[in-house]
Image (cartoon, grey):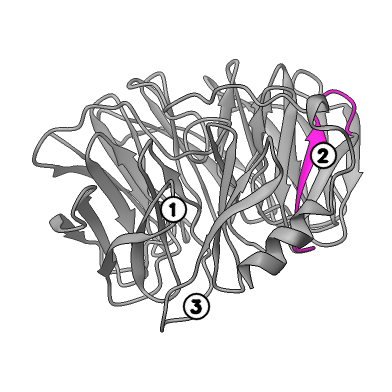
Amino acid sequence: MLCMRKLLLSLVFILPLSVLFVSAQTTGSPADSWEMFRGTPSLNGISKAVLPEKLKLLWSYQAEDSIESSAAIVNGLVYFGSMDGSLNAVSLSEGKSRWRYSIEGPIQESSPCVYNGIVYVGDLYGILHAVDAASGKVQWTFKAEGEIKSSPNCYENRVYFGSYDTHLYCLSADTGKLIWKFATEGPVHSTPSISQNCVYVSGCDETLRAIDTKTGKQLFAIPLGGYTGASAAIRNSNVFVGTFTNEVLSIDLKQRILRWSYMHPSRNFPFYSSAAVTDKYVVLGGRDKIVHCLEIATGKETWAFTTRSRVESSPLVTGNRIFVGSNDGNLYELDLKTGKKVWDFVAGAPLSASPAAAQGSLVIGSQDGVLYCFGK
């Protein structure tokens, strides 16, 4: 199967290898901010935040409906969306509301992205909203033709996101004017990841596509062998993504070949969680109720931690610590090297949202509408 897949991947070159230049990836989100889903444009889920050795609950904030997307943390404010049709800003220090921006469409899995003082987020009515980060006042909106579950990603004053109308969009960050859109062959659920001058999107058309950020032209496409809900994480010119055919794939973007694939030997369930990628490990959750840790070089599983329900939350790694939610209602802290549980918190409702960390604090939302903040 692996040899066949390598042969298949080798047949999909569209442009010479020299056309694509993949830069070295940012190794993590800064200690003082978490600006978007997975922390950085490359979506590698790594934070430089220094968290206290023992976390305690500092505050909780009750929204009016489920919180299923990840929060952003910038300049002492936490930004998060809710299924009640609101984008909220609360203070990181106290959890008090600063502003609430109301919309008609629920915000489900689209996580806020904060860029140059503006918060960008999509809703299930297919509208991308640009809202002033300080005041909560709308700056502009853009209407796609299908729901937006993809989280916006910003790069060089442009906003990139996918829609269930099968398109990847590129807008002006300042005005919301359409710069280009690229038609895939299925809904675009995932968040696009970005490396220098290239945006990568894995979608329901079972394909990883590399698109030029400036022109919207496809550079190449690689079949994944299954559709994906997870977003592609990039580190050192390699993509890591899980699929609904129960595999985790590592793809070399320079050679455009499959480096390795991983499938659990007995528990065959989809991977919906996006991966956190360190210099040694790839960590992600599965619908098999397991948090998996794979060797980055080989794809061999180094450890597995079993929860009591699906793990759709995408792990956050800071230092040697992993934080991840589970639909069993628990937030877990695991040791990166061993996978042993260090700490947990019982939220009582499913945690399909992913954690965010900055300024010595960690936040995560739950499906009963509570945003939790942990720190010292």
Residue 220 pos. (x, y %): 83, 42
Residue located 69% across and 56% down the image: 189
In the foreground, 34 or 224? 224
Q: Are marks 1 and 2 in contact (CB under 8 Å)?
A: no
Alpha carbons under labels 2 and 3: distance apart: 30 Å
Q: Which residue is mark 3?
A: 269
Sequence-first disc among 2 and 3: 2
Residue 225 in sight? no
> Is 218 rendered above or below residue 10?
above
Above or below, 216 relative to 76: below
Measured in 3D between alpha carbons, the distance from the residue under mark 1 to the one under mark 2, in whole angstroms, is: 34 Å
Task: Check if residue 120 falls in the magenta segment.
Answer: no
* Residue shown at the point (25%, 62%) measured from the top left: 347
Q: How many marks?
A: 3
Provide the secondary structure element on which disc 2 rests.
strand
- Where, quadrant-wise, is the C terminus in this rendering? top left
Q: Which mark is residue 298?
A: 1
Q: Amino acid at mark 2?
A: Tyr
Residues in magenta? Answer: 205-216
**Disc 3 residue crowd, few under 14, some 14–19, many 20+, Cα 10 Å:** some
Q: Is residue 168 visible?
A: yes
Q: Which sits in the foreground, 295 or 285?
A: 295
Q: Amino acid at mark 3?
A: Phe
Which label sits on residue 216?
A: none
Q: Which residue is mark 2?
A: 169
